[in-house]
Structures are given as structure tokens and as C-alpha cells.
Image (tube, rainbow, N blue to C red):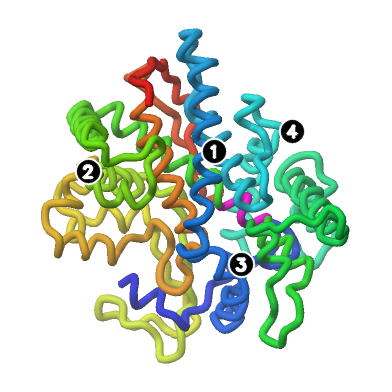
Amino acid sequence: MLPAIYHRRADKADHYVTGSFGKVASVFNIQPHEAHAAARKRIAQPYSMTAVRPIEGLIDSRIIEWTEKLDSDFVKTGKNFDFASWATYLAYDVISEVAFGKPVGFVQRGKDIDGLIQSFHDGLPIFGIMGRLYPLTKWIKKTWISDAYMVPKPGDNTGIGNIMRFRDNMLQERINENNNPSKKVERTDLLQSFLAAKNADGSPMPIEDVKAETLLVLLAGSDTMATSFQALMVYLLTNTRCYEKLLAEIVEKDTLGLLSPIPKYDEILEHLPYYGACIKEAMRMTPAAPNIFPRVVSKDGLNLYGMVVPEGFEVTSNPWISQRDKVVYGEDSESFRPERWLEDPEKAKDMEKYDFTWGYGTRVCLGKNIALLELYKIPVQFFRLFRPELVNKDKPSTYVVAGGVSFHKDLWLNLKRRKCI
């Protein structure tokens, strides 16, 4: 029923009510499908795979910094470390480089700078509450309570407001740079694309919309990638058969000289099919956003398994549920088994068709191409360089879901060097 529920003219429900991430709606929050199509069109170009491919070198530089830091701080010292935190540091540095042209510096400093990551996690419960209790939320938004306690502001020292302040500082720095001919530098990052974006009438994108879209990039493009990487780590390190099969594939292709010192995205797609299947399987079983994504039933209603759902009602699905469907994924859908993606090409097409990891239809995640570039490149380099071991195999990680977004905590590893490239 996913294609029927998430068709191109379906409006988002009030679950997406604006407020938890600020007063101005980003493309994620826009509910009417016409308004969404117009907003998406003006910012879609820098998210295309054609536009994303040139940033592969930027990701490579962040991978090098991260692996060198892991080597110096943990391999050479023998210290155990929380991989969940370090995967998140890398994800935030990558997305800030892609968005603003430079990393925040989480990896270099080895900590959550100014509590920005924790601020996002702290803001998630408000996001979840506001979305699920939207009749109350819409009423509260008309009162002083909203500005005082619910809608984040750049002046806040905690929560989403803390990230807003960071965003505003980076934005003002870029505006000053653009307005100073003597310091003007050509940029190709997302922020510069947003500043150059035009409305249908040729007018520039309002600065408040630029702020909303930039904040969305920071929030949606960091923890989600980190969660998928952490999930992959948990599944592989608790499944010896899959882990050894993956390593054998990487070593074989490495020996044949088919992988660059830092593997290119195209090389991975062509030469590491089992690795790609492991990525898909980890995201299937642990979607980064195990949330409801409700749509408003359009005119004439919806035929749902022989029952008519009237116009105006809300219908939704959740990737945590749909991606365990036995009809689509098999009787062993609750098990991590990457082979399912390689056994039958026609079955694999069905699984791809009903994949809900990135949303569905015309509202599919704009940052999907950036995330895939990271997810395919970063873990394979990690496994080439290091031999990770779980410190506590009985309880490898604490999986947290807050506000419909997921992340891991306490994924403690011990690292040893595997090889030099």
C-alpha cells in the first residue's frame, strides 16, 4: 500500500506541524504537495548525484582525518572507545563540510563541541511530542507558552536552539565573505547553493528559508548516517559468518587492485556487491527514522484492503514495521541476512521498490545521495584498516529512539590495525 498512500499528490498531515525545528517550515515540514513541489524544485539541484559526485574528495579528506585519529588515539594506545560517539563526530564533520565548506572539528578535538550533538538529542522528545499531539501543539503555538518553552530560538543555550546559533554564525560569516570582493572565494557547498536559489518568479530565496533548509541539513544529515553506520557495526560484529564473508570480499578485490587507496563510490558499487547488501540489510532492519509518516487521504478516499478510508483521514506506515514484512522480505525477515539482496534479482527489485528507509515517492529524502556516498565509502575503509572487537558482546549497544529518530549509545570497541594502504 505504500505507493497508494504516498502518491505524488498526497499532502503531509499535521504531524509535520512547524515549530519543533523553528518557526519557518523547511521542505521537510511543508504539508501541501503543491507548495512542497515548488520548494523542493528550487533547492533540489545540489542534492542530485551529478552535483554530489564532486564532493567525494571532501569526504575522503574527512575519512583520512578520522582514521588517523582512531589510529593515534586508540590503536596505538590500546584504549577502548565508544564507536557510537566517534561515528557521530565523523558524520557531523562531513555534513558541516558539505553544507558550510568546513568541518566543525568534532573529530580533531575528539568531543562534542559546545554540546551540539547532545543538543539535537535533547530536542528530539519535543519534536516527537509536538508531532503526535498536534491538535494541542497548534493551539499552544498561538500562546506565549510556545515562544517561551517549545519553539527553539538561536539564543537558547541548549536543544535545537544551540545548533541554530551555530548555523547563524556560519551563515553570517558566509554573507560577509560574499559581500567582500577582496575575500570572495568560489564555493560549491549547499549553503552557497541555497543563497543562490531562486523562487519561480526569479526572486531570491528568503533568508529565513535559507536558515530553515540549512538547519535541516545539519539535523537530518548527520545522526541518520551515523545511526546506519553504527547499526552495520553491531550486526556484523555479532554475526561472525557475515563479517568474515564481507572481509573476504574486500581482501579479494583489494588484492586484485580494484580499489583505490580510499575506495571510490563507483568502485564499491561495481566490485563489492556483498558489502552493498550488508549496507542495505542494516538500514532495512534499523532504519534511522523509525517514525510514522502520515499522509492525508485525498479526494475520493483510499481503498485500503477492501475498506474505504474517507477523504481527510490520516494513513501512515513505519519503516520499522514495513521493512520486516514477511511477504516482501521472506520468513526470516527478522534476521540479518544480506544474501537476500543477491539471491534473486526480481525479488531484490521488489525489496527496493518497497524500501521505506528514505521515505517514499516524491517526498523521498533529498539528502539520500549524500548519505549513500558516505555510507558506501566510510565503513569499507574502516574495515580495510582496522580489526574492531566488541568489548561487551552480550550487550553491544544501547539503541535509542526519541521523537521518531534513532541512534546508538555505548558501542564500545577495541581496535587493532589490519593493514597499511
4 vs 1, front mark: 1
Q: Is residue 236 above or below residue 401?
A: above
Work out which residue is located at the far left of the displayed protein and give it.
344
Which mark sits nearer the N-terminus, 2 or 4?
Answer: 4
**Mark 4, residue position:** 114
Please identify the quarter of the rendering in which residue 118 is found.
top right
Label 3, secondary structure: give it: loop
Dot 2 surroundings within 10 Å: few (below 14), some, or many (20 or more)?
A: many
Q: Amino acid at mark 2?
A: Tyr
* Quadrant where the N terminus is found in the figure: bottom left
| Amino acid residing under circle 1 | Ser
Residue range in magenta is 215-220
Q: Would you name the residue on which mark 3 appears? A: 29
- The residue nearer to you, when weighing 122 against 179, is 179
According to the picture, the residue beneath numbered tag 1 turns out to be 61
Q: Amino acid at mark 4?
A: Asp
CA distance separating discs 2 and 3: 36 Å
Q: Nearer the viewer, mark 2 or mark 4?
A: 2
Rendered view: 235 above or below 194: above
- Element carrying mark 1: helix
User: How far separated are the C-alphas under marks 2 and 4?
Assistant: 39 Å
Q: Position of residue 165 (x, y in %)?
A: 79, 47
Could you tell which of marks 2 and 3 lies nearer the N-terminus?
A: 3
